Image (cartoon, coloured by chain):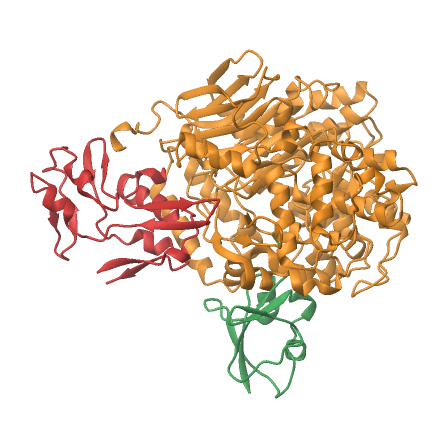
Chain colours: A orange, B green, C red
């Protein structure tokens, strides 16, 4: 094997990067390789940054997200594969069929590092293939290959087959039948249980008839100061290994938060009707580890191994292996669908993984269906003679099958929850748990107003990775409204940074690895001695505003009208549990939005101002918004520094 | 009786443990719950997402025993 | 003296392989390491780290006596003496004898892998 290995890429100017980008035209089969432009690399860093820029520049505003003019963009960022304080991630992006604007989703595992080792920082897929294909990448050898034999196979099955056919050391990203049939919340699976789950990136991949990407990279990424980087990272590993938060993370992973979330009144239950699921102890981290655990599973270069690989045998079901359930699955496919046994949650987790739907939107959308069934808005006849009861594995599995194969009302749900609610009628849109079409993450914002504001304002809809505030809501007071917008703006700067540079934010959040240490790691990788946290935060701000502009250009203004949650979240009080009585009003939401837009340098309508866009070096975007009447007057003086300045004390 | 509390992250601001071992020995009354112990030393129980004894999850109503090491952890920040 | 392997503790993170590649070859690709992790997925869902156990088969197979013991008694490759024949690679049953650009390379117990492994899968035994 050694002889076949090429040495490090020669002639690459950029340190820390793979050095090349690929542009794949699926219609013509043409693959172009280009060197990565150093100015582009520094300006947009990678991952979510490249995705944002490519989508904004290249996808026509009237292009169908599932049509030929949408792009599928794949990018590992600067830290991916580079032995920093983690660097396992890879970003998948496209104009989202769920939200109708910029969409991205980041997956861990080994795919991002492998792309870097093959020499690639960016792959852009254009157009639609004539028949099923997969992209084969083996260092410099890049080919589109026939994928007929894998088409129709489940995500896990397809990955297993490709590894069998190509070799165990290929890393695979694949879609399942849901992606093939363009279910708008289809995901991309990798490493037998990790997913780029959100925004329907799997649907876009399916629309292009791209079943999978298989990559092997045998080279090394050139590092500016490898001894320095080794010293930094080994020091961080040593220090954090004894951190008190490390052992619980290693033992339970995110699943341990099911109990906590219930006790704090934010756990989504029965389609967000309440925030307390009484039998939660049956689906918490403890039963997962005690009853189902096979092994602990880590992403590339991570010493926290939060992945729990489980084996489950339910009566009359096949024995299955699944990574998880993680917290989001354990909530949205757990109490939210009424499952009270960890075996059941793990099994439906596997159903979603294998068919290739996001467990978050998937769990949330099925739960909405369950509430509609309970209320009599969906009939047994519409369910092909089946039911859709809380806590029924059979019902869940059958309904997902209807969605994936777009049978009957399954097709409504495949198009998204907003479309389904429109078809179901009965004003059911009021109890959909979504913002901008994206299903909510596993926290109910009524007991945590800043969390609700995070959902309302996130560029990709109701997802938690941009800003997660439950702790801050606890700290500042759960009923407090004023002052929280600034916390959200701060978090929306810092957290997306980790997706841009492709490392895991959990080390920052959980075991006290500082952002400064991440910045230092990037300096050592790239040799950018003048790279600062401020530069990174400004990029976060630029991406946020560009994505906002992208959203408005595609969906019309004013921005504010898109930023409200469904009525349940400002009309109904939480009826039970520790969060009982928590409720927000429309006035509360307006107070938060006013504060938020001011902190962003936007107008009261929620449109970006010329001042902010020019400050961020986006004058053309300002002009474009102006011609579309989407540019707003600044509602308050432009905040000099957005984000860092509002850094709450506890961070 | 004495027990040992360990914590990092934002909880360390309240617990003020040894910066290297993350541990602090505290005095606790017989039969006191974890919640009562935390309140008595100024650690807001609302900031404790969960606690662990011998790597198993315990709750705030848990009554620690003499010499036990209880690891506290703040709510997930990583989300 | 050995690297003690506890198979069930391996999480497949590959830190051991990457730090080995960095330490020994100055490269970041985990393939350039002197140990392996064999993954068994989706079923049964386990990882198997494979390390050098200093069995000596490589030294026995080497016609140019390039695999010799250091003052701790640990076998290592003297690159100057290696004639790049590859017989040591064929002789290595666990498959952790490597060749980089022709020259044989093997684990010489620098312990870096055990320093980054915090799950107990790889433990230094002196």
Which image quadrant: the C terminus of chain C? bottom left
Q: Position of residue A425 (x, y in %)?
A: 90, 37
The single residue placed furthest to the right in the displayed view is A426
Residue A176 position by quadrant: top right
Q: How many marks?
A: 0
When the figure is inspected, residue A66 is found, relative to residue A253, above or below; the finding is: above
Where's residue B36, x and y in %?
67, 79
Q: Residue at x 48, y 44 (%)?
A: C42
Residue A440 appears in the figure: no
Residue at 56% over, 54% down = A312
Q: Position of residue A362 (x, y in %)?
A: 70, 42
Tell me: residue A508, above or below residue A197: below
Q: Is residue A387 above or below residue A94?
A: below
Would residue B51 be seen by someone viewing this image from the given angle? Answer: yes
Residue A586 or A280: which is nearer the viewer? A280
Query: Is A409 placed left or right of A530 in the picture?
Result: right
Depth order, front residue of A234/C87: C87
Q: Kindly identify the residue that appears in the image at 60 percent across and 62 percent down.
A: B10
Which quadrant of the rendered structure holds the N terminus of chain C?
bottom left
Give percent across and percent down for residue A112: 49, 35
Q: Which residue is at the far left?
A: C64
Left or right of residue C17: residue C58 = left
Q: Quadrant of residue A613?
A: top right
- The quadrant where residue A548 appears: top right
- Residue A110, placed above or below residue B64: above
Q: Residue furthest top?
A: A28
In the depicted view, which residue is nearer to us: A224 or A201?
A201
């Amino acid at each position: 094997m050694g002889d076949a290995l090429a040495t490090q890429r020669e002639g690459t100017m950029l340190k820390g990067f793979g050095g090349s980008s690929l542009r794949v035209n699926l219609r013509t089969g043409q693959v172009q390789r280009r060197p990565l432009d150093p100015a582009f690399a520094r300006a947009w860093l990678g991952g979510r940054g490249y995705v944002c820029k490519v989508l904004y520049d290249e996808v026509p505003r009237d292009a169908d997200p599932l049509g030929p003019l949408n792009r599928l963009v794949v990018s590992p960022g600067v830290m991916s594969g580079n032995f920093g304080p983690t660097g396992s991630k890879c970003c998948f992006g496209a104009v989202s069929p769920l939200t109708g604007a910029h969409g991205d989703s980041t997956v861990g595992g080994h795919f991002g590092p492998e792309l870097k080792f093959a020499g690639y920082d960016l792959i852009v897929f254009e157009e639609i293939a004539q028949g099923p294909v997969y992209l084969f990448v083996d260092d410099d050898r890049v080919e589109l290959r026939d994928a007929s034999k894998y088409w129709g196979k489940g995500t896990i099955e397809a990955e297993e087959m490709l590894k069998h056919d190509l070799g165990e050391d290929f890393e695979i990203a694949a879609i399942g039948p849901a992606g093939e049939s363009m279910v708008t919340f289809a995901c991309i699976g990798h490493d037998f249980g990790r997913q780029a789950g959100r925004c329907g990136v799997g649907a876009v991949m399916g629309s292009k008839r791209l079943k999978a990407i298989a990559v092997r990279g045998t080279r090394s990424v050139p590092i500016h100061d490898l001894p320095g980087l080794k010293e930094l990272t080994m020091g961080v590993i040593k220090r954090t290994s004894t951190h008190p938060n490390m052992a619980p993370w290693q033992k339970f992973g995110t699943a341990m938060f099911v109990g906590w979330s219930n006790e704090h009144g934010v756990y989504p239950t029965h389609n967000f009707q309440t925030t307390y699921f009484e039998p939660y102890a049956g689906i918490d981290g403890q039963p997962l580890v005690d009853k189902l655990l096979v092994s602990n599973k880590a992403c590339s270069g991570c010493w926290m191994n939060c992945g729990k690989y489980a084996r489950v045998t339910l009566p009359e079901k096949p024995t299955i292996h699944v990574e998880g359930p993680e917290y989001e699955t354990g909530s949205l496919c757990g109490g939210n669908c009424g499952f009270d046994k960890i075996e059941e949650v793990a099994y439906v987790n596997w159903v979603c993984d294998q068919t290739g739907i996001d467990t978050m939107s998937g769990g949330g959308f099925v739960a909405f269906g369950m509430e509609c069934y309970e209320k009599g808005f969906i009939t047994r006849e519409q369910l092909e003679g089946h039911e859709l009861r809380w806590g029924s594995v059979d019902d869940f599995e059958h309904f997902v099958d209807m969605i994936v194969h777009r049978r009957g009302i399954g097709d409504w749900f495949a198009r998204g929850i907003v479309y389904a609610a429109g078809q179901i009628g009965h004003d059911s849109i009021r109890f959909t748990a979504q913002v901008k079409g994206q299903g909510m993450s596993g926290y109910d914002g009524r007991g945590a107003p800043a969390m609700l504001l995070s959902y309302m304002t996130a560029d990709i809809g109701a997802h938690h990775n941009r800003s997660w505030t439950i702790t801050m809501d606890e700290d500042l007071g759960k009923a407090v409204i004023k002052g929280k917008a600034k916390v959200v703006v701060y978090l929306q700067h810092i957290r997306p940074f980790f997706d841009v540079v492709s490392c895991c934010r959990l080390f920052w959040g959980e075991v006290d690895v500082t952002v400064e240490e991440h910045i230092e790691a990037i300096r050592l990788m790239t040799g950018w001695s003048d790279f600062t946290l401020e530069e990174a935060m400004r990029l976060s701000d630029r991406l946020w505003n560009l994505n906002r502009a992208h959203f408005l250009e595609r969906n019309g203004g004013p921005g504010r009208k898109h930023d409200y949650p469904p009525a349940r979240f400002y009309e109904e009080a939480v009826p039970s549990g520790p969060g009982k009585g928590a409720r927000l009003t429309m006035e509360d939401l307006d107070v938060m939005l006013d504060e938020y837009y001011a902190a962003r340098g936007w107008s009261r309508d929620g449109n970006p101002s010329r001042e902010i866009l020019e400050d961020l070096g986006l004058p053309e975007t300002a002009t474009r918004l102006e011609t579309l009447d989407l540019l707003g007057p600044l509602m308050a003086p432009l905040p000099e520094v957005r984000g860092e300045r509002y850094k709450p004390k506890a961070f | 009786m004495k027990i040992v509390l360990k914590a990092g992250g934002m909880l360390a601001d309240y617990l003020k443990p040894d910066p290297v071992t993350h541990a602090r020995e505290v005095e606790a009354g017989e039969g006191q719950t974890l919640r009562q112990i935390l309140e008595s030393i100024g650690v807001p129980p609302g900031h404790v997402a969960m606690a662990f004894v011998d790597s198993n999850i315990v709750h705030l109503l848990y009554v620690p025993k003499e010499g036990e090491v209880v690891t506290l952890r703040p709510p997930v920040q990583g989300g | 003296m050995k690297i003690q392997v506890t198979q069930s503790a391996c999480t497949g993170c590959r830190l051991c392989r990457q730090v080995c590649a960095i330490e020994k070859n100055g490269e970041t690709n985990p393939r350039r390491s002197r140990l392996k992790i064999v993954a068994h997925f989706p079923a049964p869902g386990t990882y198997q780290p494979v390390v050098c156990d200093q069995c000596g088969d490589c030294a026995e197979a080497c016609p140019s006596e390039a695999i010799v013991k250091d003052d701790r008694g640990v076998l290592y490759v003297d690159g100057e003496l290696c004639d790049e024949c590859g017989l040591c690679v064929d002789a290595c049953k666990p498959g952790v004898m490597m060749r980089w650009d022709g020259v044989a390379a093997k684990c010489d117990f620098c312990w870096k892998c055990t320093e980054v492994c915090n799950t107990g899968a790889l433990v230094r035994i002196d």
